[in-house]
Image: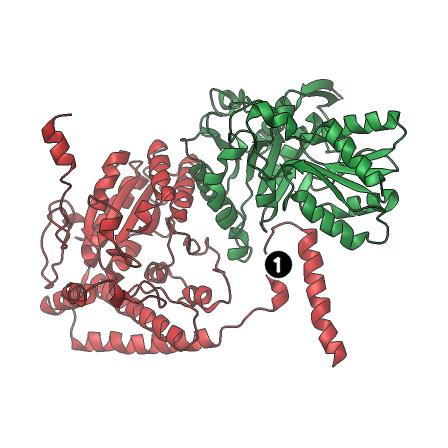
Chain colours: A green, B red
Amino acid sequence: MALEKVTLGKSLTNGMRKAMDRDPKVVLIGEDIGKLGGVFRITEGLQKDFGEERVIDSPLAESGIVGTAVGMALRGYRPVCEIQFDGFVYPAFDQIVCQVAKLHARALGAVKIPMVIRIPFGGGIGSPEHHSESPEAYFAHTAGLRVVACSNPEDAHWMIQQAIECDDPVIFFEPKRRYHDRAEYDTDATSAPRGLFEANIVRPGTDVTLLGYGPVVKTMVEAAAAAEAEGTSIEVIDLRSLSPLPIDTIVESVRRTGRLVVVHEASSFLGMASEISAQVTERCFYELEAPVIRVAGANIPYPPSRMEEDFLPDLDRILDGVDRALAY
Amino acid sequence: MSDKVVAELHQPTPEVGDGGPDMIQLLTPEGQRVSHPDYDQYVADLTAEDLRSFYRDLVLIRRLDAEGYALQRQGELGLWPSLLGQEAAQVGSGRALKPHDFVFPTYREHGVGFVRGMDPQSSLQLFRGVSQGGWDPTEHNFHLYTIVIGAQTLHATGYAMGVKMDGNVGTGDPDRDTAVICYFGDGASSQGDVNEAFVYAASFDAPVVFFCQNNQWAISEPVTKQTRIPLFQRARGFGFPGVRVDGNDVLATYAVTKHCLDEARNGNGPLLIEAYTYRMGAHTTADDPTKYRVSAEVEQWKFRDPILRLKTYLAHEGMADDAFFTQVDEEADGFAAELREGCITMETMAGETMWDHVYAEDHPVMEAERAAFLAYKASFEEAN
């Protein structure tokens, strides 16, 4: 037992370090991840300890990062790619959706592509364009990929290790504005609190189910605390796995509360909330007291950072969504 | 920049259509053996029997291609990408490989697959629509066909980086040192992935040989749309050697590829080979080249036929007689009959297997959808 207060970013570093210690086939590749430790310092110290062959500073070409990682996976390695920012993943999009996602199926199971593609995502850091996006739905839409998002340090610590151990390709979203959030947990624990593809009920409640992932989870918990003061009991669920969708946990909760509010930073149109809304409606038609409410980014390109507060779902917009669900 | 330099930059090496003076050739289109100071050594050990087996490979894969074309026209294949005219490029390079080398093909390397020992049916199943590839790449160290143009060049580079990480480069142990060969075409040379692969391979000294079959046409676009300079010269800009070989000359292609693979295995990779050849047929069976190229060009290339020149050479040197050529033709007939039979009897897998290999690990959606599909199908049987 070693209770420590660790940041989300450092939890990822520690998780990768453990995975690399355990399995010599785990290699990291990305831009500036070596000496610099990545622009967010998530790989800090790893090249020093594991060498340049296992922590590979790549040329500045994202398709190359993912495409060469595919080749390494075919050779028996377990590559972990770092895409520097969400908006820079698109040059690698073809490799991800045409190759990474499909190779196992094309070979009728004869080859596996056990790779992780880490993507810092979401806004709220005051950056110029392409640095604050939420592209998760593109990947969740693609069969053959698994898509997860961590929201807190302990999950970051475990989920990155579980993603690396997974024999399928995992797109791993990291909430960049939460990298410096700290939490205390047992860093010596030998087993994960839950599976990689399970949702987590972070705060039980009875009146409304509030569902989200990544950076908005903290805001949802704050919203639930604020609502409690006004007598509303909100159940907060951290989705964690976007594909496969842990739909049973959501359905079980909605059957109890009768109301669902889904939150994400990505634009609402065909976002994760759209699919969740459809599936919940299919399965909870008679239990729903209100339509599924979406609290999401506007359907516009991500705005200039001076305006992002008006774009991102904050505590007030989440509570407004809860109020709308309760109004039925 | 001086006016002279600027003038030179604007006058790239002209392409004269025959490969030019830089092209390595050991066998002329007339079937005459010409000597080359650097590359003779790589064919010196080839026996008459080896050369006859080269000839056999060339004839059989041309027949494979003819059958693929016919099967498409008969509705047995959805599409067929022809290798007609590129037989020597594929046999020469394929035969230069060692079993433990690894191949990343495009979707046209039926000939390379054949000389690697792949079941010839393998290349038919994708185009018949019974699988999206379906073979185990590790069985013959021959990766699945890649249809997205140039995407496999990065896979080959990453694989080669892995070979190097394994320590299987430059050890001097011929059973251990491993090279990777990656096929692509003149059209692919414009793709970002190919250029990124060149950068990565160079930065990490990857033991990969990039093998560009310049067949002069990317569907309807001539190679002049892809490049101002001969493609092999591109390598220099990326910091590694490039060489142009007569891709219709099986001996030269074999020699040059053997040399480059050796270099890669010894740690001197990457390298680029441009096999100068010609796509005698259409891009695929869905294409109509009469819309965009003149028949005079095709006629001109008929004189450079890869099979005819080896046949002339073998006959002239007394290494093969009419009985041998007849025997190969007869073998090709039997081979073709087997191919046709194998193709039309190829089994289509049951619908519920579509969900089987999307993921390596259990996935709830796959299980749920498969179960729903089976229940839906069963509902018809119950109704009957």
Please give the residue where the numbered disc 1 appears in the rendered image.
B356
Q: Is residue B178 visible?
A: no
**Along the line of sight, the residue nearer the viewer: B108 or B206:** B108
Relative image position of residue A92 (x, y in whole percent)? 47, 40
**Along the line of sight, the residue nearer the viewer: B113 or A268:** A268
Q: Residues within 10 Å of mark 1 (few under 14, many from 20)?
A: some
The residue at the far top in this view is A5
In which quadrant is the C terminus of chain B drawn?
A: bottom right
Q: Indicate left or right for B74 with B329 as reference.
A: right
**Along the line of sight, the residue nearer the viewer: B350 or B206:** B350
In which quadrant is the N terminus of chain B drawn?
A: top left
Q: Indicate left or right for B106 with B280 as reference.
A: right
Query: Quadrant location of residue A200?
Result: top right
Q: Residue at x 16, y 77 (%)?
A: B322
Q: Residue at x 79, y 44 (%)?
A: A249
The residue at the far bottom in this view is B384
Relative to A222, say whether B231 is above or below: below
**Along the line of sight, the residue nearer the viewer: B352 or B299:** B299
Query: Quadrant location of residue B85?
Result: bottom left
Query: Quadrant location of residue A187?
Result: top right
Relative to A79, say whether B298 is above or below: below
Relative image position of residue A121 (x, y in whole percent)? 59, 32
Circle 1 — which element?
Answer: loop
Relative image position of residue A31 (x, y in whole percent)? 46, 28
